[in-house]
Amino acid sequence: MSEAGRYQPYSYFQLMEVSLRELLVEKGILTEAQVAETVEDMRQRSPERGARVVARAWVSDSYRKKLLEDGTKACEELGLDVPALRLIVVENTPQAHNMIVCTLCSCYPRMLLGIPPDWYKSRNYRSRAVREPRAVLSEFGLFLEEGTAIRVHDSTADMRYLVLPMRPAGTEGWSEERLASIVTRDCMIGVAVPKAN
Amino acid sequence: MVEARFRRGDRVHVRAAYPLGHIRTPYYIRGHSGVIERLCGSFGNPEELAQQRSGEPKQPLYRVRFLQKDVWPAYRGNPGDLLEVEIFQHWLE
């Protein structure tokens, strides 16, 4: 720790992490280098990965179909390695809006979106998303049309979910990179929709 | 591996059981009825895996679709609003 400033003792969980890590290294089960590499790998994952997938589906209808059919395979096609992740991509339409939650813990497509935001893991979001999704969405500033049904996906076991949002009007002729830039993390969880700036 | 007993479109009922342990069937959905949306494949039984056992035989895992208004009696919203939950076969009847 090279942080300047006043001394702060480790919290319970920080202390547990350090103790466990040191023990694993001492016993030769892991090396410090492996731990550092894994942490770095996790840090590299960000919602830009998911945004690339969405943008490709917006410009290529055949890719979109493949993505909905077999999310894991479609990601591999873009060079995104999604091991041990069975990805289900759910598509927003004018008739139905999709939203993802894990009521039991915080299952999340980390390979495509990185580390989940704190609110995703909060008891408030997890308990309310399944029973009053419209109220939750309105708190995110998203107000759906009366006629649009909501599909809430509770990620309870081995599947991981990604929302494929609708491509907004006003983005005709945009490049894939530019399209990807408006696909935010929240759009792919289903608590927001992309906007042409 | 356990044989898959249900198919897309089958009406199923989630067991209203409350055993101790690491259960991946959410409490709120137990005792409710829905329709099989798809079979996801077969996976190690999480209740066994959590006990450091092998998780074998693997259990078929389904996505089951419920109507929000069936699950929450006071639900307000579009009557077509849905809730889809992954549930292992041994929790369905």
Image (cartoon, rainbow, N blue to C red):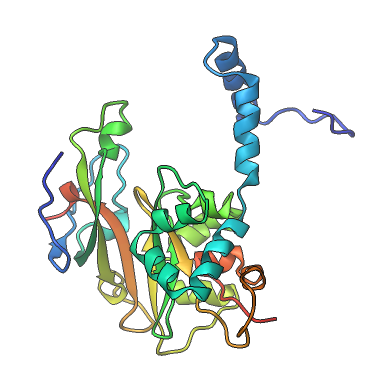
Drawn side of residue A178 relative to residue A121, left or right: right
Residue at screen point 33% across, 77% down: B74
Residue at (20, 67) in percent of width and height: B34
Q: Quadrant of the C terminus of chain B?
A: bottom left
- Indicate left or right for A71 with B44 as reference: right
Above/below status of A6 relative to A116: above
Residue B77, relative to residue A129: is it above or below?
Answer: below
Nearer to the camera, A141 or A80: A80
Q: Give the total number of marks visible in the rendering.
A: 0
> Residue A39 at x, y = what percent?
63, 35
Measured along the vertical axis of the image, is residue A150 above or below residue A85? below
Specify whether B3 is left or right of B62: left
Q: Nearer the viewer, residue A31 or B62?
A: A31
Q: Is residue A158 visible?
A: yes
On the rendered image, what quadrant is the N terminus of chain B found in?
A: top left
Residue closer to the observer: B51 or A108: A108
The quadrant where residue A18 appears: top right
Residue A128 seen from this side: no
User: In the figure, is residue A73 to the left or right of A17?
Assistant: left
Between A155 and A134, the one lying in front of the other is A155
Query: Residue B65: horizontal and vertical position, in percent?
Result: 26, 67
In the image, what residue occupies the spot 48% across and 53% down? A109
Residue visible at 35% across and 48% down in the picture:
A158
Residue occupying the far top of the picture? A27
B92 up-or-down from A187: above or below: above
Q: Position of residue B10 (x, y in %)?
A: 13, 66
Q: Position of residue A141 (x, y in %)?
A: 60, 77
